[in-house]
């Protein structure tokens, strides 16, 4: 029966997509990759500016940055220029050059590009007089600030779509029409002059922390990720994962999980990770018998883990060190166990599904040899090792980025010279550096524009104090629900949860829902910055440690990439698999249950993050053990398989056991284990009888 299923699957397997198909797929589901097609002169101009921007950041990473406002203004101004050179207004095709479209770009785009550059550089230009203008801006200051806000709205709309600009406009409207707001949201309101003054001339708005982190840290690590991929590190990770995990039951799916975890250490993009590894793993999963939607879901769920995997973690790790004022090593240490729990949860469900379907692993002839792979590509690992070593030594992140990028260039030189001799090798390495620096700058455009526009949202929050008002409303609702539920539970002989515990639980649930909704169409970085300003104060009112609160909103923002109806990573994977996109999204969310459960675990038991206040090893092992067992129990329940098919009553029992196991309480863990054991023992006995 299994052989017939496998043969059928092989006969209908998805053909491997070409590089052009994969690029088109990435552009379809990732607005940040929808670059316009332009005439060659304009393309060369844009590429040259991108290369110079990367050179500037590479130099500043190693030799120091200019004053903060100058550095941020220069980075934002050049980025806005490049956004309008790279993204068309409505995603149209190449425009024929003419009087109204010099070099094939409409005149309005040239105007917006120039206006954004000038308005962004204006604040650094008047920086010496800025202290005398804050609070008393000149008409030219208001005009320049208005221009920059309008240009930012359009730049983000082009590069990311409508959601974030609409949110920014709503926040600006809230600041302006404060007197007309209902109830607790009312405030005195602010004139347009005051709004622009706060958003444009102070460090609380556009030129604030979000833009500073992107310009100081994130650009460098995006560039490192691109250069690391060009020396073959990403492919090495995929080959190593294939060699290690491919031979086990459901091998290609396990390769997907392991390779996505490894690739995620240098890539922070869910969609890019999905397309890169999915091009190889999804057809292989379908070939051995996995349903198409499940194959797509495995890749999507695995790839979203890249954003929570140290040491890069997208941009959020560097934002956290600015917001929390802690060393980067603290953030990376705190991320280790939750990241493991996510991949463990996906891996368990992949294994159980393979057992349920009776799927094989890959034959040794289909797998690379791990030793040969490593012996051939070990040089490409050195920059990553150097990066981690410098970070752990306590030096600055941009110093680590500088030396690791330098190491990538050195590896490129060695690789190219060994392939083609000295002269051809130098030419080949120069070309690869040019391509890598251009691509690194291009991949940073959308996130820079978004960070600057998020500064508008943060500025309105600090100007109006709306964050604390929202926190008060949410905790009030959660407290009301907690009192009602506690009253219903009073009929039980023991008190399962106190009112404060229930209040925190409901607050976490409401916060999680808001984070997921905000993540629909908004990149993880922008979502995290907004939720830190709006949602983190909510958790702070209930005594949640800042590090825990930041990780909680971060994890649920990432979850949006696999949460329908806007599950971009799942939809990209479905495009590769030829599967129903919505079904793939639902399955990906199910596979990501570890990422759903674990934030609640460390919210109630911060010891899971290893570096929180009051950490003890006993608390850590209790929380970690409960999380592992709970994820396993829940995976078995949703997969309908533990060691054999489950009875419906056993599945219900396992769900209840999972919820109790992840509760950071000794009594709940014991009760959860007691509920887990009967189905497990019956399953083992059934399996023994079946094998006999």
Image: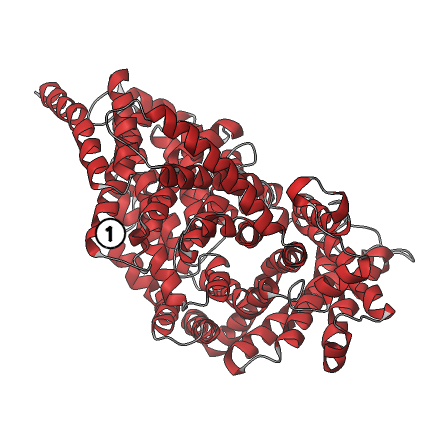
Left or right of residue 67, residue 264 in this image: left
How is the structure coloured here? Answer: secondary structure
Please tell me whether residue 76 is drawn above or below residue 467 in the rendered image: below
- The answer to whether any part of residue 22 appears in the image is no
The residue shown at (49%, 47%) is 270
Left or right of residue 245, residue 437 in this image: right
The residue shown at (72%, 78%) is 131
Q: Quadrant of the C terminus?
A: top left
- The answer to whether any part of residue 640 appears in the image is yes
Q: Quadrant of the N terminus?
A: top left
How crowded pointer 1 is (Cα within 10 Å; few <14, some 14-19, many 20+) is rated as some
The residue shown at (59%, 70%) is 54
Toward the left, the furthest residue is: 692
Toward the right, the furthest residue is: 99
List x then y, in percent, for residue 541: 47, 50
List x then y, in percent, for residue 518: 57, 42
Left or right of residue 445, residue 7 in this image: left
To which residue does mark 1 refer? 620
Please tell me whether residue 366 is drawn above or below residue 78 in the rendered image: above
Q: Name the residue nearer the viewer: 37 or 107.
A: 107
Q: Name the residue nearer the viewer: 633 or 600.
A: 600
List x then y, in percent, for residue 293: 45, 29
Q: Name the residue nearer the viewer: 68 or 685.
A: 68
Identify the element where label 1 is drawn: helix
List x then y, in percent, for residue 120: 74, 68
Tell me the quarter of the picture where residue 30 sits.
Answer: top right
Q: How many marks?
A: 1
């Amino acid at each position: 029966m299994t052989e017939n299923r496998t043969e059928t699957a092989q006969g209908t397997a998805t053909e491997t997509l070409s590089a052009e198909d994969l690029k088109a797929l990435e552009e379809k589901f990732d607005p940040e990759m929808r670059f316009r097609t332009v005439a060659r002169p304009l393309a060369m101009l844009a590429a040259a500016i991108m290369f110079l921007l990367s050179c500037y950041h590479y130099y500043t990473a190693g030799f120091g940055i200019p004053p903060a406002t100058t550095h941020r203004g220069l980075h934002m101004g050049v980025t806005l220029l490049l956004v309008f050179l790279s993204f068309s207004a409505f995603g149209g095709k190449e425009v024929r050059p003419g009087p109204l479209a010099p070099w094939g770009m409409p005149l309005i785009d040239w105007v917006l590009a120039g206006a954004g550059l000038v308005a962004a550089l204006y604040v650094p230009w008047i920086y010496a007089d800025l202290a005398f203008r804050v609070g008393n801006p000149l008409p030219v200051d208001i005009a320049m600030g208005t221009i920059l806000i309008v240009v930012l709205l359009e730049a983000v709309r082009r590069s990311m779509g409508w959601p974030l600009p609409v949110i920014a406009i709503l926040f600006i409207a809230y600041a302006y029409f404060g007197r007309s707001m209902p109830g607790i949201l009312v405030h005195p309101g602010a004139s347009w002059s005051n709004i622009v003054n706060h958003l444009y001339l102070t460090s609380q708005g556009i030129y604030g922390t979000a833009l500073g982190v992107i310009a100081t840290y994130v650009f460098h690590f995006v560039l490192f990720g691109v250069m690391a991929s060009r020396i073959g590190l990403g492919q090495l990770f995929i080959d190593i994962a294939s060699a290690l995990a491919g031979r086990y039951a459901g091998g290609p799916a396990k390769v997907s999980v392991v390779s996505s975890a490894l690739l995620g250490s240098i890539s922070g993009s869910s969609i890019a990770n999905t397309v890169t590894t999915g091009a190889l793993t999804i057809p292989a999963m379908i070939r051995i018998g996995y349903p198409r939607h499940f194959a797509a879901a495995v890749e999507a769920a695995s790839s979203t883990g890249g954003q929570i995997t140290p040491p890069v973690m997208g941009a959020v790790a560097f934002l956290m060190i600015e917001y929390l004022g802690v060393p980067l090593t603290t953030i990376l240490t705190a991320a280790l166990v939750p990241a493991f729990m996510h991949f463990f949860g996906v891996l368990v469900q992949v294994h159980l599904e393979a057992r349920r379907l009776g799927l094989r692993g890959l034959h040794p002839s289909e797998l690379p040899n791990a030793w040969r792979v490593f012996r051939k590509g070990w040089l490409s690992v050195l920059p990553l090792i150097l990066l981690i070593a410098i970070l752990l030594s306590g030096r600055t992140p941009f110093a680590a980025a500088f030396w690791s990028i330098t190491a990538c260039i050195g590896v490129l030189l060695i690789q190219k010279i060994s392939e083609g001799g000295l002269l051809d090798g130098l030419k080949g390495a120069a070309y690869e550096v040019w391509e890598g620096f251009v691509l690194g700058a291009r991949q940073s455009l959308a996130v820079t524009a978004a960070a600057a526009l998020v500064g508008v949202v943060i500025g309105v929050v600090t100007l109006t104090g709306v964050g604390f008002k929202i926190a008060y409303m949410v905790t009030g609702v959660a407290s009301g629900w907690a009192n009602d539920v506690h009253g219903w539970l009073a009929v039980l002989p023991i008190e399962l949860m106190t009112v404060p515990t229930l209040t925190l639980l409901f607050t976490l649930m409401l916060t999680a829902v808001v984070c997921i909704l905000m993540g629909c169409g908004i990149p993880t970085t922008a979502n995290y910055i907004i939720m830190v300003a709006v949602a983190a104060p909510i958790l702070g009112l209930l005594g949640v440690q800042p590090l825990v609160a930041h990780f909680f909103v971060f994890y649920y923002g990432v979850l949006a990439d696999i949460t329908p109806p806007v599950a971009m990573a799942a939809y990209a994977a479905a495009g590769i698999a030829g599967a129903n996109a919505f079904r793939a999204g639902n399955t990906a969310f199910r596979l990501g249950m570890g990422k759903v459960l674990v934030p609640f675990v460390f919210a109630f038991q911060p010891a899971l993050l290893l570096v929180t206040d009051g950490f003890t090893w006993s608390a850590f092992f209790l929380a970690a053990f409960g999380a592992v067992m709970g994820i396993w129990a829940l995976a078995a329940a949703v997969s309908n398989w533990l060691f054999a098919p489950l009875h419906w009553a056993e599945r219900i029992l396992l769900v209840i056991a999972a919820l109790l196991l992840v509760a950071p309480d000794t009594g709940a863990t014991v009760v959860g284990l007691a509920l887990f054991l009967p189905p497990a023992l019956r399953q083992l006995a059934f399996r023994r009888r079946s094998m006999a």
